[in-house]
Image: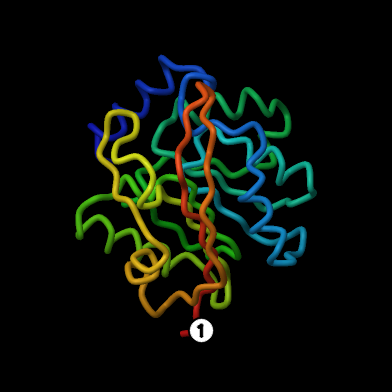
Amino acid sequence: MNNSRKAHWDKIYATKTPGEVSWTQETPVTSLAFIHSFNLDPNASIIDVGGGESQLVDRLLEEGFDDVTVLDISERAIEHSKWRLGKSADQVTWVTSDILEFESNKKFDVWHDRATFHFLTTTEEIERYVEIVKGHIKANGFLVMSTFSEDGPTKCSGLEVKQYSETSLEEQLGHDFVKIRCLKEDHQTPFKTMQNFLFCAFRRSVD
C-alpha cells in the first residue's frame, strides 16, 4: 500500500469531522439517481470506491440492497462508517485498500466512484485504475464516475487533482466502456463554497 497516501487520508479522517471536509453530502442524490436508473435487482453487487464516510451505503441498505462493498484507503474512515451504521455494518463488506492495489475475484454489477479517480494524476496511475475497473465489473455492468469538472477545483485536501470534461473522461476509460449519459453539478460544501463535478454513467462493453 502507498503508505504516504494512506497516512494522508488517515490524518484527514482523524482530525476532521464530516462537516469539515468539502465532499460531505447528507444525501448523495445524484449518485442514487444514477444507480436507480439501472433498474437493479436488490441482490445486485455494488462497490463504492473511496466510500470513506459517505452515506451512500446507508441509503443503499435502506433501499434493500444486500450485496454492498465499501472500499477506502483509510481504515479510520471505514471505522467511522461502521460506528455510524451500528449493527447494519455487518451487512456490508468493508475493504481497506489503496485502489491501485485492489485485488478480488469478485465482479460487480455497479462500480461507483465519487471523487477518487481525480486524485490519480499520472498516466501510470490512471491506466492502472482503468485496468482494475475493467477486471472487476461484469460484462454489461455499470460504472458511475464523478470527478471535478474543468470548472472545478484544481486541488482538494492539499492534493493536486485532475479535472475532466465529458470527452476527456470518455477517452481515459477507452472503448471498454460505453457512455450512457453525463451531467455537471454544483456541489455545495459544508462550508458553503461551490465545487463543480462531472458525473457520468457507463456500461461495460461485452468482451
Q: Which residue corresponds to the image point at 71% horizontal and 46% vertical from the top-left?
A: 60
196 relative to 117 in the view: left or right: right
Q: Is residue 69 depicted above or below 178 in this figure?
A: above
Q: Which residue is mark 1?
A: 206
Q: Is residue 43 depicted above or below 177 in this figure?
A: above
Q: How many marks?
A: 1
Q: Which residue corresponds to the image point at 54% horizontal and 33% vertical from the top-left?
A: 188
185 relative to 148 in the view: left or right: right
Secondary structure of the residue carrying tag 1 is loop
Q: Position of residue 27 (x, y in %)?
A: 67, 37
Q: Nearer the viewer, residue 113 or 168?
A: 168
Residue 129: quadrant of the picture: bottom left
Q: Residue furthest top?
A: 15
Q: Which residue corresponds to the image point at 37% horizontal and 25% vertical from the top-left?
A: 10
Tell me the colour scheme of the image: rainbow
155 relative to 16 in the view: left or right: left
Q: Residue furthest bottom?
A: 207
Q: Position of residue 12 (x, y in %)?
A: 38, 23
